[in-house]
Image: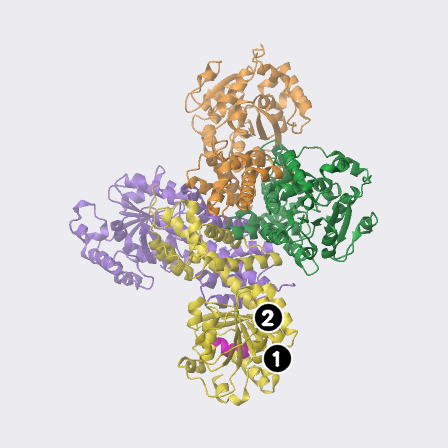
Chain colours: A purple, B yellow, C orange, D green
């Protein structure tokens, strides 16, 4: 890809590549990753540290970046890009926060205007149809795109629709990456998001320096939609491991063992997981404030089950976990932390972790 | 405890109940542990290192220890006790291996004889009824027990029957610990087993130095049967996390992502677990040699489901995982590694991780 | 309701009631049903028998009826209405069959035109969004409705969206019934469909004579959307009973009993059902030609599971049945009869009903 | 059968093995049945009605019949045999009821004594181990058997153990039938039990006249254990159809339809079943008094799941139904009618059939 840069003519050159610094940056990126995913412990790149201290490089040709969708995730993510000295063009249904515009970001009237003014457009909205509207509504992003621009959808949406959206964007001579994140609001504020990317290696390499301003552990997992697929896989494992820990700790407590000691003992062996450590602790301590809301995890499992239906996959335990989430919702738990799934099991057992069994 | 050994006088044998020294020793035990489990990172005790270099202390008053059940687990476990200089009395249906008797362990004619000659009797047999026979058959251990002796069942069996077995042993004026292990044959050979113990603190403290010769990460998780309960909880989590990783990696592969890269990306986030690292890797690499055999995990899930039925617990995903193991068995997989559970999901999907999807 | 007719001012009078014949007809309808559902054995009403012998009444003021959606279900249903002497106005994306227009039905250019020319408009299209388009697209039915007209949706769609569609139609001063059917193509041809209706009693009474031209066992099960809800409930029971019969006959066959004899023995007891008789026979005889296609049943279970998610219901076995249908689809079974669900169970068991077990 | 008895030549007594007549009788038996099961609608035999009026034939060569297990099922079943003029020898842990001994039945000291005095021994006890004890304990039936006698186990037990029990009985030169029943206490009193038989045709033909004194719809479904297998299949379907009706009626009620009307509408179509009629009605009327107790159905599903584990069958919905029964038990429902399984679903939904939904 370094070669590509040198004989850049072949493809319109995303701005960061237009100056030596950029080349080095990308070069560095390539070397450090060797094309593979970057291990979590790797320290932030040099330019990044610069950005941290808030001293944007003097060059007047930093990237022009669009950001559509400025909610609790999008706002801090955009802020990190601004802090790195990039010129941002913003659009959301509600006007963007002053914390962004005060630092020089420009509020636009539509996604179309954002796309006209930017080289790379990030999208961060709630659900599949929202991305569809943001891209393809009358004054949407697609209407403002021109050859060589890049659309990066960081929302968590359907892998199936993602393939269709990417095809329509590429048909305009543009590039598309799907790059959903995990790590939540905290990860967004701390620029520590895990970013799972689907698309072309070259496009990934171009956008990677910007991803590094928003997250750690950034991986290109495959072609178009692979990022969304990876995010869904992540949500399947998280939901089913919560369910597993719930069944196990409830079993232990109901049988008369001390669930806190059982959790501690299990952390020493094959049963150990991030979920046992964090969500297992919440089940024992009975703290079910999000964290990650059940209603959001229901949406993600719905993506899994809908895609599974289309592909002819059986996901028996994902299907059951969804039904247990439904039960939580029926008991007012839509906004509980997803570790609250254990409450559906406790309901059936007529017993709560923390109780002492009579019999 | 190193101190205790050196001025061994105080403690000729680990049956403190029988003499004044006991009180102090137990006291000390209680203080030293503070009633809480010992954290996994604690280094091996002094005498343990001694044992490692194979120089058993000269004192002629080491413990007299019985060991019933000398299969692939029991034999190496007993060997560690012998290496520490303890006098062992052995019984199994088949005569014990020469590697044990050559080092001075005594083969006995029955569990009864073992119990008559020992202060502490360890049991390590396959299943719940085997423990029942070992303890209560005509020439069984119980027939040889006398007041103050200790029975330690290290088999993995039903928590329900364990309560009954313990009660019958305690009715003879003896003590009972249930202390199942995880870590398998390798853990037994390397003395690195995780040991989950149920019973009285004082009895645990007495036997703990012997546990430390066989394993690491030794936890008293509660009263009688809590060890077995903890082991069952462990097996629930392991089975359901394998199932979760199977659904997720199969989803990713079927949707066209690279399962190896997806696994690597997921290891950076909340979805990470020992199972994703080890068993996830086996699913991607298609290596299904045990490891831990499906037929053994079926036995463990059966313990979970039977106890759940007795206690009025719903374990929906454990129940489903068992049905998937049944399917593996139907396809000749009883002796596959338990990560082979993914093959039942692949069978339904008509697609294998590693294939490339046509559509 | 007769009273309502006399002081008709209060509500726009659906056309069939504008002449004595209509009143009698409706009257008759009321008496014969007594407001409750009509038992299946009740003989067809007088006008119906007339229709059977194909001699439409001479009156020139029969109802003007619209029919949108003329596929394998809609065409024979519309034909029965024509045969009864009603004037039909038809619309479908593809031009309606000659067998309809030859008998005097009028093909229209849009749903709008159909609605303008008709007093009652029937809709019979594949899925929820299709009904949305048929009703509310630019040249859709709603655009042609005027006060007092009746829309009857006989498609099988989401109860949730149905409430929204009904509200939008009623906001135009019109009436709405949801009236999905079961009985399939055969039932449509033989005018023996089961019709499950949701809406107002008075509107039901008005339309009932027309329903009686298309089906038997016609029940008003509740208010708006209750018909769709009832149809979903029907599809839940059918799918889960097929699954139940599949598990049972496979169990019997695998255990070495004769599945044909077992089925016969079970038909004598509490296990008996239409499904055991019909679908159980298909499983034994290995005839999996539709019948009712798996892909259609998947759509219906998806309606069940989506609505359950919205309402906070857990439907564990419906969720599992859907995953088994997915597995059938993965093996090319989208077009198998839904009794083919047993093949997913057989796949897991590595054994087919009809085989003789080795062990 | 009385006729047979009077022209007794053909068939002096139902223990043909003991004398030349046997061969002919078996021949006849074979011809008469044509090897196929008797259709359910066949009217009771003439002698049966005689028996009803309680006038046993005078002949002194009636069968000598043993009956072990005289609980709520066994007592009325034995009474029908006595009423038909047979000489009964009884054994149970508790002394048999006077209503039996007053009519000339003889109470014995053990199963051994019963077997010594009888040609055919019926067993009707609660569970698999009870049959094992009744047959093979020291003073058990096997100890009293001699060549040519017949053991008929009418208990509902494991098909797997049944094969073992049959083999041990046949090793003594005797015959074995497994003949579990459905129909419950009422069926036992009214001699209307459904009897599902496994074993040899000739033995079945010999015992059939006695079965006809206790039940209707008597079917030989296959070889040894096929009766037990068929009973398990029956219980699978009954449990899963209850679950299906529960999901469907709960869905309908929660969505705002009238569950009573929905049930009535569904009874007209493919969703109809004995369970929808009877158990569906109990769910709507909220009457959960047995009927058939949940704890008994749990035992039966446990037979299904244990055998499935041994055979390598996946029974996903049976497994889930068992977990739902566990939940009922946790809420005090062990003695509810099995239709009470719906309460576990209602618990999850936070909504009961019969409530009116707020939203």
Q: Position of residue D295 (x, y in %)?
A: 66, 52
Label 2: state its secondary structure.
helix
Q: Position of residue D83 (x, y in %)?
A: 79, 42
Magenta region, residue range: B204-213
Mark 2 nearby-residue class (10 Å; few <14, some 14–19, many ≥20): many
Q: Main secondary structure of the magenta part?
A: helix
Q: Position of residue A93 (x, y in %)?
A: 40, 44
Q: Position of residue C334 (x, y in %)?
A: 44, 36
Mark 1 nearby-residue class (10 Å; few <14, some 14–19, many ≥20): some
Front residue of this view, candidates D186 and B346: D186
Front residue of this view, candidates B352 and A78: B352
D342 up-or-down from C80: above or below: below
Front residue of this view, candidates B251 and D228: D228
| Image position of B111 (left or right of A193) | right
Q: Which residue is mark 2?
A: B135
Label 1: state its secondary structure.
loop
Kindly identify which chain the residue marked by label 2 belongs to.
Answer: B
The label on residue B148 is 1
């Amino acid at each position: 890809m370094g070669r590509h840069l040198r004989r850049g003519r072949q493809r319109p050159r995303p701005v960061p590549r237009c100056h030596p610094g950029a080349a080095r940056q990308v070069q560095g990126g390539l070397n450090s990753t060797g094309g593979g995913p970057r291990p979590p412990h790797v320290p932030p790149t040099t330019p990044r540290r610069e950005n941290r201290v808030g001293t944007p490089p003097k060059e007047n040709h930093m990237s022009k970046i669009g950001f559509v969708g400025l909610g609790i995730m999008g706002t801090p993510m955009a802020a990190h890009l601004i802090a790195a000295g990039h010129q941002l063009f913003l659009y959301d249904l509600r006007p963007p926060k002053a914390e962004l515009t005060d630092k020089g970001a420009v509020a636009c009237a539509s996604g179309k205007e954002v796309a006209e003014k930017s080289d790379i457009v990030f999208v961060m909205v709630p659900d599949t149809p929202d991305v569809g509207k943001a891209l393809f509504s009358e004054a949407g992003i697609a209407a403002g795109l021109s050859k060589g621009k890049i659309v990066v959808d960081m929302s968590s949406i359907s892998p199936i629709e993602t393939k269709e959206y990417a095809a329509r964007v590429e048909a305009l001579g543009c590039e598309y990456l799907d790059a959903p994140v995990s790590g939540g609001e905290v990860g967004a504020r701390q620029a520590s998001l895990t970013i799972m990317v689907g698309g072309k290696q070259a496009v990934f390499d171009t956008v990677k320096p910007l991803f590094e301003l928003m997250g750690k552990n950034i991986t290109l997992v495959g072609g178009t939609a692979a990022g969304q697929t990876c995010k869904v896989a992540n949500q399947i494992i998280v939901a089913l491991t919560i369910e597993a820990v719930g069944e196990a700790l409830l079993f232990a407590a109901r049988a008369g063992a001390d669930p806190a000691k059982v959790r501690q003992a299990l952390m020493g062996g094959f049963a150990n997981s991030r979920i046992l450590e964090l969500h297992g602790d919440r089940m024992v301590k009975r703290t079910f404030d999000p964290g990650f809301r059940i209603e959001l995890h229901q949406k993600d499992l719905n993506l899994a089950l809908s895609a599974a239906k289309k592909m002819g996959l059986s996901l028996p335990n994902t299907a059951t976990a969804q039904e247990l989430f439904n039960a939580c919702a029926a008991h007012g738990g839509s906004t509980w932390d997803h570790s609250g799934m254990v409450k559906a099991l406790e309901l059936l057992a007529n017993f709560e972790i923390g109780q002492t069994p009579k019999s």
